[in-house]
Amino acid sequence: MPDVGGHSVIGGLLTGQGFTAVLPNLKVCARPKAKATGQVCTAVCKPGHQCLNQPFGGRGLVLAPAETGVVVDVLDIDRGGAQQLVARFDADVAKCTNESHCTFAAADEQRYGQDAAVEIAFGPVNQPTSIPPPIEFAEGPPAPAPTDVPPQRRCGDMTQGTFFDHPGNRLPLYADSDVEVWGRVTAYQNGHLVGGGGQYPMNDGITFAAKTCSVRPHVVQFVTRKVVLSDGRLLPGQYLTSDIFNEDNFAMSYPYTTDINAPSWHVDARTPLNQNGVPNPPYYDAGNGAGWCAAGNQLTTFDQPSVSAGGNIAADLEAFNTKNQTNLAVKEAQPFFTTFVLCGDSPVAAVAWHVTGGANGGRLYLKDSVNRNPQTLTSDLNRLVRASSVAPNRGRRIPIN
């Protein structure tokens, strides 16, 4: 391979004819063929003509059920950090396997030599065997639910468990006889300020309280996130967050919204994922590490969403700029939520809201709408559960060989 520059790309199993002049630094990137988003890359391999058994970064290459077509870029990364496209081709992960490698021509034979080619194979595919039906919430009277609550979860005692304080700068977002929503709330756990305290950032969260249920209440929360670039475009990719309460670390991973008319909704819960990648049960208050407290049939949940460009945004932005030959920055990484308050499994209210970065490192909570119409709440809840099933928190992870 001639020394044509750049040594930084995504890797895989790669060999070819005529690549003899300089040892390249290979990197392999792939995305679903059916859409222009969802590209993931391997790490840059050490110099050589082979790049073996390299996994894709993040949660891997995510494909819809029964989807096997991908678009692959093989790159060479040079000393100066510039990258050269060695090959770009469509591949079938079901056919390019360890037992049957696939070969594709290099992008520029004049540069890489006559008959220069790339040989590639994809490793085992981890995929759901079928799509289970979405969770359906009951219409009509709620089923009885247990009312006993562990003492460490009771509200109002700062020495025992989660305790929510409404300080002087609290922000009432919504209140009626059944439901209360507060912004800029301080949370304590076993007598200590959640997050360690400190002046900045303020430990300002949002609470949802169910006050009048006759059975055990729950909260089901949905989240979508859009990452706006400096030119106004929406960044494609996956929002990845650390979730130490799930062994596979995928429960809080979901695609960014790239079409404002079709948000990518996902269940915001740290509970086990079903085979379709949706938390089940979907209750926010059932998840490990979630902030909530209860007293009898009264429930209060606490959340403090991230408004920074964290997760995998930096890596997705780099891939986007590389692919489009741009130098854009992130203007805002904004989450949007719809939170349902339920008595048993019957929703009594839905609050749409979002949060942005406020002054001095704090957060600004904004209420968008409230639905208290019993004729539409259950259908709206089930619609968002189905949307989460279509675009799950976890899809298939495909290591590349």
Image (spheres, rainbow, N blue to C red):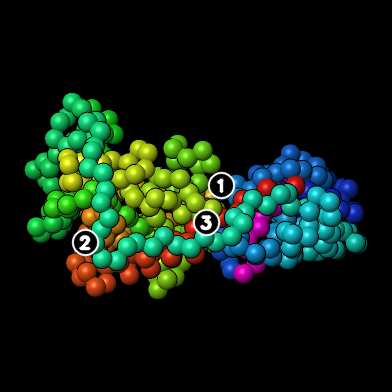
Q: Main secondary structure of the magenta part?
A: strand
x and y percent of residue 178 in the render? 13, 56
Q: Judge from the rendering whether residue 236 lies leftward or rightward of residue 368; answer left or right.
A: right
Q: Mark 3: give few (<14), some (14-19) or many (20+) Cα within 10 Å.
A: many
x and y percent of residue 45 in the render? 72, 42
Q: What is the secondary structure assignment of the residue under circle 1?
A: loop
Judge whether residue 362 can be spotted in this image: no
Q: Which residue is mark 3?
A: 276
x and y percent of residue 100 in the render? 84, 55
Question: What amino acid is found at the position of numbered circle 3 in the picture?
Answer: Asn
Q: Which residue is mark 2?
A: 348
Judge whether residue 188 can be spotted in this image: yes
Residue 13 among magenta residues: no
Q: Which residue is mark 1?
A: 58
Magenta extent? 24-34
Q: Please report whichever mark, 3 or 2, sits nearer to the chain's N-terminal start.
A: 3
